Image (cartoon, rainbow, N blue to C red):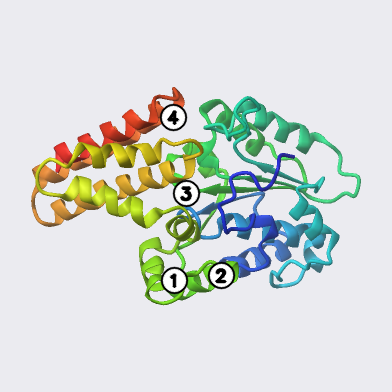
Amino acid sequence: MSDIRADVLDGARHPAEQPKLFGHAAAEAFLARSYRSGKGHHAILIEGPEGIGKATLAFRFANHVLSHPEPAQAPETLADPSPDSSVTRQLAAGASHNLLHLTRPVDEKTGKAKSAITVDEVRKAGKFLAQTSGTGNWRIVVIDPADDLNRNAANAILKILEEPPKRALFLVLTHAPGKLLPTIRSRCLPLGLSPLSPDDLAAAMASLGVLPSGPRAGEVIAAAHGSVSQALKLVNYGGFDIVEAFRAIVGGAGEPPRRDVHRLADVLSAKDSEIVFGFFCQQASDFVTEAARAAALAGDIGRADRLAGLSSRLAEKLTVAQAYNLDRKQTVIGLLDDIRASL
């Protein structure tokens, strides 16, 4: 199993180490009841925006199942993982023989996560599920997120989901269920999670010890839209500065100073800037989507159609740039120019 702390944001805990879950009591209750009934589905598709607790819920439920392998004897609720439990310690250390966390592998040459979950990773899941559990316990695969499966990997997962072994459980996470193969969605039980409320987000950030004091706390909560990961990027990765620079460039009157464009592009293309680059791309995508929606509501159908087309083109360009490792600075400059030209 790879290092469970790979790709964990500064200030965050890995979901397997998170002692609390905020804002999803109804989903926890549903999973607990479903499991206890003995009629639970073998594959749960946990849906919702990034950073709202999907992976934490998955690991809490996995802890519950592995701690109570006989459904009829399981409690009616999910408890906070006990630090004294061997199951909790194994999951936190990434050392459980009964759980496989399927996520983007690390490239041995660069030391960075690859752009997709590959078919080789899915083959590991096949071997993992084929093994006979020495304890007769459950075998759980957490796919985190299924959005990162490339085409071959998605087809390989589909074959496993079609004929799952006994006492196997799949917890499939997705930020964008519409992008998954319909055949994968059809073989899973959907469980939708909503963004955290302001109070729940504040509690989650406070539990991590990273909620700013004073008025800045309110700004973070408002700008994060119910996502802990977005809040962490705003607080610990200069997210507010990135948003401010982006909006000044695309929203200002006249041509923006090229030095400002290049300064932002330099920040986003610096070494080890994957997180801030991803944050910027999401902000840019959200900005264009909101602009298209506002234009449609205002009756400016031509502008709305132009911006909707731009949204699709930007997503395609970013996918190609990532797949072929294109120059990130030029990608950012081109994206900014495209947005300004379409506004």
Among numbered discs 4 and 3, the one appearing first in the sequence? 3
What amino acid does circle 4 point to?
Gln
Measured Cα–Cα span from mark 3 to mark 1? 18 Å
Quick one: label 4 or label 2, which is nearer the N terminus? Answer: 2
If you read the primary sequence from the N terminus, does the residue marked by circle 3 or circle 1 appear first?
A: 3
- Which amino acid lies under the numbered mark 3 shown in the image of this protein? His
Q: Amino acid at mark 1?
A: Ser
Q: Quadrant of the C terminus?
A: top left
* Element under disc 3: loop
Using residue 59 as the reference point, say whether residue 194 is left or right of it: left
Q: Position of residue 71 (x, y in %)?
A: 77, 62
Task: Judge from the rendering whether residue 339 lies leftward or rightward of residue 269; answer left or right.
Answer: left
Residue 327 falls in which quadrant of the image?
A: top left
What residue does disc 3 label?
175
- Residue 118 in view in this figure: yes
Q: Which mark is residue 322?
A: 4
Which numbered tag is attached to residue 83?
Answer: none
Quadrant that contains the N terminus: top right
On the question of residue 309 being in view, the answer is: no
Label 2 or label 1, whichever comes before in sequence order: 2
Residue beneath disc 2: 22
Q: Are marks 4 and 3 in contact (CB under 8 Å)?
A: no
Q: Earlier in the sequence, mark 3 or mark 2?
A: 2
Provide the secondary structure element on which disc 1 rests: loop
Disc number for residue 197: 1
Q: Earlier in the sequence, mark 4 or mark 1?
A: 1
Residues at marks 3 and 2, CA–CA distance in whole angstroms: 18 Å
For image coordinates 62% across by 27% down, the residue present is: 119
Provide the secondary structure element on which disc 4 rests: helix
Foreground of the two, 38 or 52: 52
